[in-house]
Amino acid sequence: MASLSLRKIKKVYDNTVVAVQSFDLEIADKEFIVLVGPSGCGKSTTLRMVAGLEVITEGELYIGEKKVNTVPPKDRDIAMVFQNYALYPHMTVYDNIAYGLRLRKFPKRVIDQKVREAAEILDITELLKRKPKALSGGQRQRVAIGRAIVREPQVFLMDEPLSNLDAKLRNQMRSEIIKLRQKVNTTFIYVTHDQTEAMTLGDRIVIMKEGFVQQVGTPNEVFHHPANLFVAGFIGTPQMNFFDARLERTGDDYAVSVGGAQVALSAEKCRRLLAGDVQSQDVTLGVRPEHIQLTEASGGIAATVDVSEMMGSAIHIHVDAEGRDVVIVVPVSEEEAESGVWYTRGMPLRFVFRGSAAHVFDKETGRNLELPPKEPEPPAEEPALPEEPPAGRVSLEKPAEKQREPALVPAGPEREGEIGNPFADD
Ligand code: ADP
């Protein structure tokens, strides 16, 4: 168990590709942190720097009290589970889990106890004698997790561990990871591109884009108070709707005007906007699909149905409104479902939303106007004698050794260079 501190971490590949920059994060002991963002945003690079698989170009990484920038992976007391399970195909499940402990010369009795405990936690006791090829994808991933658990690491790193699994299995494994977390009770850093995984697993979520952290917060914070348009659009499904709108301030009150409708913002929103002394201006307005209500009245915003999708307990109606594609989620009761409520193409509708559901973003920067503007960073001081080598020389250093394990052919796409597990088996 350990806390981590990532301070102004930067990664430049080959002196040219800036993969991660200005990455600042304090991770508490036993916290479950999820790094999420679209492909290429720098999640895996960040995780691999924590693991010691990539050299940190700039910044400082602490595990507990110790600065570990140059500590080799095997000495960081970290376990990592990859997207591809990297099991030894010729060994039984038992031997796969026990392998790293045997290498470390643990007594046989201790190994047996640890393997059986891990198997119990992961509900794979009955599979211990099987070879990996006789396991399903989900079971293989559990074995890979088992191999990591027995090491009782200070920090558990997981890089897209569920993305090779089909949707149903992914949901199941997701809840198993929640249970696992309660049982092993250590610090987790989990990488995914799937915002649902991030929302359900993370104590806090770090949302990244193009190498920069966009927001760090609890699932509740990032959903209800997205820092900018990117986070607003990335978190939540279906995606938040956006409109061109006008924010009007009258004294201490605010309202948004869109499509001829005017909606007074809630007291809480007004308080936040006032704190930033936000003035009347054109804005991008965001409203989540589930926060829109259809209305019979002549007020509201006019729309025309494009398509509607029956999802069971709700209908997702895609409409054209104000020159934008807008999605409205309408809950459906059992009676309505039986009587066949449907919204056909071309049907005119009107909709409204409450002032508490409106998110207003700066038209130019995309910043959420409810949040305080970011303090400008103080100019970086020139260190007299740099502790770390300058960025330009880092790639000349020998990178952390990547050790490879033979991998089972994964069920899904495999990313080059992610097969090795230098933590379990050194
Ligand atoms: P993510 O995990 O969010 O998909 P990555 O951390 O894998 O993103 O990649 C971040 C950026 O760094 C991307 O632009 C990617 O192309 C680049 N990158 C990743 N690994 C390397 C590498 N070994 N050499 C050069 N560029 C790399």
Image: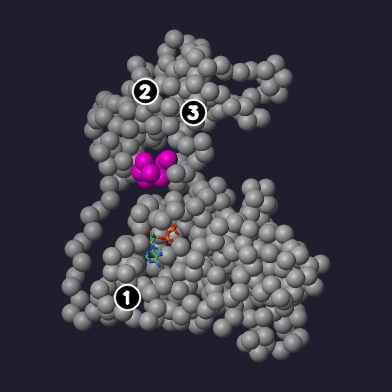
Which residue reaches farthest right? 126
Q: Nearer the viewer, residue 173 or 8?
A: 173
Task: Give the residue displayed 35% in from the left and 62% down from the top.
Answer: 20
Q: Element type at marker 1?
A: loop
Q: Element type at marker 2?
A: loop
The residue indicated by pointer 3 is 327
Horizontally, residue 249 falls left or right of residue 49, namely left
How far from the left and from the top, in percent, is residue 289? Answer: 49, 31
Q: Is residue 354 above or below residue 385?
A: above
Question: Ligand 1 is found in which quarter of the picture?
Answer: bottom left
Question: Between marks 2 and 3, how big is the CA–CA gap?
Answer: 13 Å
Q: Amino acid at mark 2?
A: Gly
Task: Give the residue displayed 51% in from the left and 55% down from the top.
Answer: 192
Magenta-highlighted residues: 227-233
Q: Amino acid at mark 3?
A: Val
Mark 1 within 8 Å of ligand 1, using the beta carbon:
no
Locate the C terminus by quadrant.
Answer: bottom right
> Does the rendering let one see residue 390?
yes
- Which disc number belongs to residue 395? 1
Which residue reaches farthest front? 409
The answer to whether residue 20 is magenta is no
Q: For the residues carrying marks 1 and 2, which lies nearer the camera in this image?
A: 1
Horizontally, residue 335 falls left or right of residue 54, namely right
Figure quadrant of residue 158: bottom right
Q: Nearer the viewer, residue 159 or 357?
A: 159
Marks 2 and 3 in Cβ contact (< 8 Å): no
Q: Is residue 214 above or below residue 113?
A: above
Figure quadrant of residue 242: top left
Figure quadrant of residue 68: bottom left
The residue indicated by pointer 2 is 323
Question: Between marks 3 and 1, how big is the CA–CA gap?
Answer: 47 Å
> How would you rate the neighbour count of disc 1 (Cα within 10 Å): few for under 14, some for 14-19, many for 20 or more?
some
